[in-house]
Image: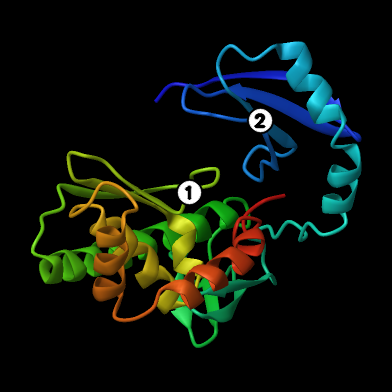
Amino acid sequence: MSTVRSEVGEVAGVPLTVRVHPRARRLKLRFDDKRGGLLLTVPPRTSRRAALAWAESQRDWVAAQLTRQPAAQPLAPGALIPFDGGDVRLEWDETVERSVRRVGNAMVSGGPREGFERRIEAWLKARARDALSSETAEIAAAAGVTVRAVSIGDADSRWGSCSAAGAIRYSWRLILAPPHVRRFVVAHEVAHRLHMDHSPAFKAAEARLYGGPVAPARLLLRRLSPVLRRVGRH
């Protein structure tokens, strides 16, 4: 689904980008962690002037949210980041090989200091791809459905998506979350292979594939989201 973005200015000192989205039904303002700044989603045929005036009226909300935003967490040596339900420390040791290794509660990479962050992120994405592919195959088998492909990305706001053709895409950041939270997202997306909606039948399938009520996992993911989305940012 195509969208149109444009840089338009700022609100309360924070850069603002407008996105016209063909499926939007109302104005929506949120922080855009990937690009930095604010993202204003606008329905088609909405007056640009009216949309910007509405965004400007949200200055107090923006100011309040700024005080609550977690700090960016670069993938730099010495950083403590969430991983698979725990915390790990990133360590650089120029005397060892550059490939990333898990050593107890640390992720260690050698080689040049330049590129350390890139190597850590690539390792995390590879672990995410492996874990999510395996869990998707397991849950799809339990559901009696096929999944055409599993891929990872870094969507602005969605943790997963399932196409009508059976391709599932996840955020690589799910590897930072506790395993049961990741499993909830997998169950949610695989359940869409049975029901491409959020009907009672879908919710029943989701709970069955997850193995119980999904509300606690959904709530925890919502609480963790601001922190997980700041990992790897500057």
The residue nearer to you, when weighing 117 against 4, is: 4
77 and 219: which is toward the camera: 219
Q: Which residue lies at the image location 57% right of the left edge and 51% below the top edge?
A: 115
Residue 53, image x and y in percent? 83, 21
Q: In x, y percent, where is residue 121? A: 50, 56
Q: Residues within 10 Å of mark 2 (few under 14, many from 20)?
A: some
In the depicted view, which residue is nearer to us: 24 or 180? Answer: 24
Q: Which mark is residue 27?
A: 2
Camera-side residue: 23 or 75? Answer: 23
Type of amino acid at the residue the image marks with label 2? Leu
- Rendering colour mode: rainbow
Q: Is residue 220 left or right of residue 134?
A: right
Label 1: element kind: loop
Give the quarter of the figure containing the N terminus. top left
Q: Is residue 208 above or below residue 67?
A: below
Residue that protrudes farthest toward the front in the picture: 200
The percent coordinates of residue 9 (x first, y second) are: 82, 21
- The residue that mark 1 highlights is 158
Residue 205, by quadrant, is bottom left
